[in-house]
Image (spheres, helix red, strand yellow):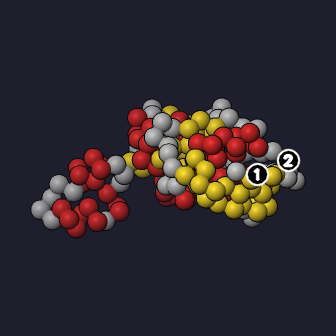
Amino acid sequence: VNASAAATASREHLTFNPQRSQQPRITVTYQSSDIRDVIAAFATFSQRTIVIGKDVQGTVTAEIKDQPWDVALQAVLQAQGLAASEENTGIISVDSYANILAKEANEPLTTQLVAINYASASSLVQTIASLLSKDCSKAGLTTAASGANTSQNVQGAATCIVRGGVVADTSTNTLLVTEVASRMPDLMGY
């Protein structure tokens, strides 16, 4: 592994947006490197705690030139069929999409009241509802597809089950949002 890195910006939250990311920039080359070693190098460079799922495996060959570390990490993970999620504590978890969705599917829901200013709460219901976490597991697809024409139902991506919900209280211009606890901060950031 030939690795050199240059930090040119302050450390902030994981943003995964190359146009807006203010994370330190990294230049590094990996040649058939174990994915766990690559993730450990990103953890060291970013000075963040990154926890790797037990099923994460593979090798990485990549040349990253002067990119924000969070954007580079996202690209490496996507190429491996992996994803990162940041916990409320700031710890970053790396695992397969399936394992992350399974974890969210078992996580308890929480409800929060959100006072709305400068807009009608009822006008935001559809937007917030589209951002709620969805369970698109095979069990959800099988249940939704239990009809006479199952092959057509399974092909449609609209068989996901939304776990949370959102309701507008027009008298107080407030939203009542129910969502998976780990996703609530991201949802409230919109």
Q: Is residue 129 visible?
A: yes
Q: Which residue is mark 2?
A: 10
Is disc 1 surrounded by few (<14), some (14 to 19) or many (20+) residues within 10 Å? few
Query: Residue at horizontal 23%, vertical 52%?
Result: 142
Q: Is residue 6 left or right of residue 99?
A: right
Q: Is residue 118 visible?
A: no
Q: Which residue is mark 1?
A: 3
Q: Amino acid at mark 1?
A: Ala
| SS at badge 1 | strand
Is disc 2 surrounded by few (<14), some (14 to 19) or many (20+) residues within 10 Å? few
Percent of width and height locating residue 49: 68, 35
Quadrant in the rendering for residue 103: top left
Percent of width and height locating residue 94: 56, 43
Between residues 169 and 109, which one lies in front from this camera angle?
A: 109
Q: Is residue 159 left or right of residue 5?
A: left
Between residues 123 and 111, which one lies in front from this camera angle?
A: 111
Quadrant in the rendering for residue 29: bottom right
Location of residue 78 with respect to 106 vertically, above or below: below
Q: Amino acid at mark 2?
A: Ser
Q: Is residue 182 left or right of residue 50?
A: left
Query: Residue at horizontal 75%, vertical 43%?
Result: 46
Give the alpha-carbon distance from disc 1 to disc 2, as whole Å. Answer: 20 Å
